[in-house]
Image (tube, grey):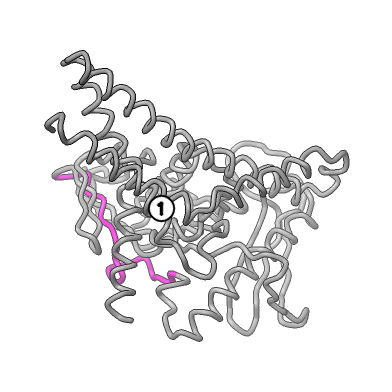
Amino acid sequence: MATTDFPVQLKELGATLASVEKVLDLGAMRVEVDDLQDQVGAPDLWDDQANAQRVTGRLSALQSELERIEGLRQRLDDVEVLVELAQEEGDADSITEAETEIGRLRTAIERLEVRTLLSGEYDERDAIVTIRSGAGGDDATDFAEMLQRMYVRWAERHKYVVDIYDTSWAEGAGIKSATFAVRAPYAYGTLSVESGTHRLVRISPFDNQGRRQTSFAAVEVVPVLEQTDEVDIPEEEIRVDVYRSSGPGGQSVNTTDSAVRLTHVPTGVVVSCQNEKSQLQNKASAMVILKAKLLALKKAEERAELDELRGDVQASWGDQMRNYVLNPYQLVKDLRTELESGNTQSVLDGEIDDFIEAGIRWRRGVEADSA
C-alpha cells in the first residue's frame, strides 16, 4: 500500500464503521445497558433466577458488543495519528505498522458489517441450539459432542453466555443429543445459518481395523421467545414425563426424578431439560424450548420453508451443509458458500466466524435472488 493511499483507506473505513454504528444504534444499546445495570442493582434480582440470568447475560453481551465497536473506533483514530506522524517523520517502521493495523481493521470492520445484514423478524434474539447425532454409530455420537464443544467454544471466544438445557449421553462415546441456549445480541440471526446436516470423515477411533468412517450430525437453531410472543399451548396437548437425569459422574441431579420431557401431541415435537435440580425449574425451561420450536414450526409452515427456519434435517446424506474431513486430508468445507479451511483443529476449537459470516452473506444473496 502506497503511503498516499492511507487517507483514502482510512476515510473508507471510517465511513463503513459510521454506517455500522448507525444501523446497530449505539445510543439505543447504551440506554439498554443503563436499564439492565439498574435491574442488576436491584436487591430482589435473584428472587427470580431465570430472569436474573437473562438480565445478567444480556448485560454482559451488550457491554462486550459496545466495547468491541468503541474499540474499533478508537483503533481507527489511533492509526490516523500514527499515519500522520509516520509520514511527517518518514518513519518506515511506523508506516509498516500502520499498513498492518489498517489491514486488521478492515477485516474487523467487515466482520462487524455482517451484523447489519441480520434484519429477520427474530434475528436479534437469543438462540436455542439442538444437536442430534445421525448415521454413523459411535462416530456420530462422538461427532455430535465435538460440534457441541465447537459452538460452546465459539460462544466463549465472544464472551457469550451459554445455558445447557439438556444432554442425552450415548452408551458408548459422545452424545445422542444436546440442547443449549446462546445468549447474545443477534445470536439467533448469527447461528441460524448453522442449521443443517454436518458430515465428518475420519479414521474411526472406534474401529479396531482403523477404517475410515463417515458420520453425520444435525444442527437445529430456533429463536428464544419473549413474553410478548404469544404461543398458546393448551394443557391437554402436552404430555409431561419425568425421569432421573443421566450423565457421567455422580452429579446430585442424578439422584431424583427431576428431569422433564414434554411432548406436544399434535405435532410430535419433543423437548427435555435436566440441567436443574428442581423438577419445576426443568419444566419451565422445557416450556421455553417447546414454545420456541412450535413458533419456528408455525412460521416455517406459513412460509412453506420448514428447512430454512427450523433446520429440520435428518442427519444423513441429504441436506448436507458442511463437511469436516480429517482423513485422508485435512479440510472443512461449506457446501453452500464453497468456503474452505485446512485448519480443521482451529475450526473444531470454535474458530467458525468466517463460515458464519459467509453463510449470512450467502443467505442474503439467496433472499435477494428470490425477491
Residue 30 versus residue 179 in the image, above or below: above
Residue at the spot 46% in from the left edge and 84% down from the top edge = 303
Say which of 4 and 291 sits in front: 4
**Residue 73 visible in rendering:** yes
**Is 316 covered by the magenta stretch?**
yes
Location of residue 296 by image quarter: bottom right
Say which of 34 and 330 sits in front: 34
Q: The disc labelled 1 sits on which kind of residue?
A: Ser
User: At numbered mark 1, what does the secondary structure look like: helix, strand or loop?
Assistant: helix
Q: Is residue 101 left or right of residue 35?
A: left
Q: Is residue 222 left or right of residue 239?
A: left
> What's drawn in magenta, residue-wise?
311-328
The quadrant of the picture occupied by the N terminus is top left
Q: 10 Å neighbourhood of mark 1: few (<14), some, or many (≥20)?
A: some
Residue at the spot 39% in from the left edge and 30% down from the top edge = 77
Position in image of residue 135 (x %, y %): 35, 62
Q: Which residue is mark 1?
A: 19
* Number of numbered markers: 1
Residue at the spot 19% in from the left edge and 22% down from the top edge = 96
**Residue 91 visible in rendering:** no
